[in-house]
Image (spheres, grey):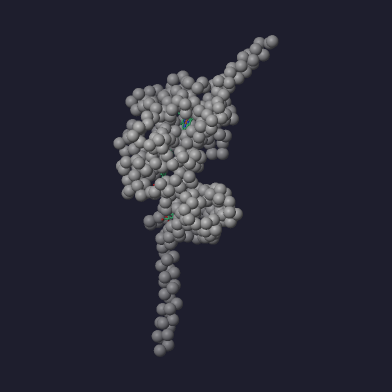
Amino acid sequence: MSRGGATLALALGFFLGAGAAAAASPEELARGELLFHIGGCTNCHTAEGGPLLAGGDPLETPFGRFYAPNITPDPETGIGRWSEADFLRAMREGRSPSGAPYYPAFPYTSYAKMSEADLRALKAYLDTIPPVRRPNREHELGFPYNVRWGLLLWQWAFHDPAPFRPDPTKSEAWNRGAYLVLGPGHCAECHTPRTWYGALDDSRAFAGGRLGKEVIPNITSDPEKGIGRWTAGDLRGLLVIGIKPDGDFVGGDMAKVVRNGTAKLPEADREAIVEFLLSLPPR
Amino acid sequence: MRGKWFVAIGAVLGAPMILGVASAQDPIKARQAEFKEFGKRMGAIKDTVIDKKGGTLADVAGHAEYLAGKIPQIPSWFPEGSDKGETRALPEIWLNFADFEAKAKNAQGLAQALVVAAKSGDQAATAQAFGKLGQEGCGGCHQPYRRPQN
């Protein structure tokens, strides 16, 4: 056997091995797909009309312009070489395989609340996405935001990688809704206002505000400022097709959250979200 | 005597003209009332299709026909300069008026598709056509041409 052949065999063995380790049951893949939808990964990682998860359109933020990278299983330009542990670390700790911290424009601050089993299922599902070779674009950030290592301090101060803890005094459906909203659904990333240093202001959880040029509504149970006058049926209509009680439809980022996310959930999960949202204290 | 007749005829003819002028001067309020009715119709469709609480697919087809009939009028509700006042209409409408008209045309097509789906009696197809009309038809025009609330 020539040396080239041996290298090829080794390389093949490596990939086959990786494939075998990732062999997931159909149930796990189905769960991974559901988490992929409610996680809204395509909203940022797929460009309009571009290949699935091969890199997104620019995300405008007050800190500059971010380009969500290629997360298809392509070994060169995607995350095809990542181990499961690499993926878990990225989603929980917000660190790359080499230890570099990620910007919170990638909402790992919410994904960290996901259970380990769910994160594994999500990775197994991502492994089934067709690999696409497409190099990443550099973010366009001004100083000091372009100094990635500065994020270490931010993470140390503000990132809590603890998983979601169910509240035993609440119903199972409420806990499921809370998990979906606070974890994979990352609803707070938009609906909770931020402090000047960019962390979520939990004292004003889900009270809305401004995010770039988008106006984010208050979704607490406050009857004036929030959605306290909405019925469960009103919320269901919003989560299924994006219709509001006045017959108008949500637009912008929320339209994507509905179309790619909440509309694709099984009914029981949507009901769980409704139960949790209606219980949010007024703010 | 003849003078009085002229005055009387003038008053009878003039009144509607004056009223007509008054409502033409407030295209903003007039179109907002039309859009509110759109919202009511969409809400009624939702009650039937999503919440399954009353109404038949024939009612849905009726609401969709109403919308398909009205939507082509939308561009005529936006005379030049009617972005001043209590309105969420963005000035971009008049910078890209051909595109604004195309958005109305697209929405009209989607309303017609909803009529067809509802008349076929297929629940699932009706729900799908309804979502498409709302998201792509109504939402597709609000997104670029309407200011977000407050």
| Residue A200, position as x, y percentages in the image | 35, 34
Residue A91 vs A258, above or below: the answer is: above
Q: Residue at horizontal 57%, vertical 34%?
A: A51
| Residue A115, position as x, y percentages in the image | 43, 27
**How many numbered marks, from 0 up?**
0
Residue A8 vs A46, above or below: the answer is: above
Along the line of sight, the residue nearer the viewer: B47 or A42: B47
Along the line of sight, the residue nearer the viewer: B89 or B109: B109
Q: Residue at horizontal 41%, vertical 82%?
A: B8
Q: Is residue A173 visible?
A: yes
Q: Residue at horizontal 68%, vertical 11%?
A: A2
Q: Residue at horizontal 35%, vertical 41%?
A: A279
Q: Is residue B145 visible?
A: no
Along the line of sight, the residue nearer the viewer: A158 or B96: A158
Q: Within the image, what quadrant is residue A186 found in?
A: top left
| Residue A59, position as x, y percentages in the image | 46, 36
Left or right: A27, with B21 as reference point? right
Left or right: B101, with A106 as reference point? right
Residue B18 vs B100, above or below: the answer is: below
Left or right: B16, with A10 as reference point? left
Q: Split into 4 quadrants, where in the image is the C terminus of chain A?
A: top left
Along the line of sight, the residue nearer the viewer: A10 or A4: A10
| Residue A231, position as x, y percentages in the image | 39, 48
Q: Within the image, what quadrant is residue A216 found in?
A: top left
| Extreme-right residue of the structure | A1
Residue B133 vs A192, above or below: the answer is: below
| Extreme-bottom residue of the structure | B1
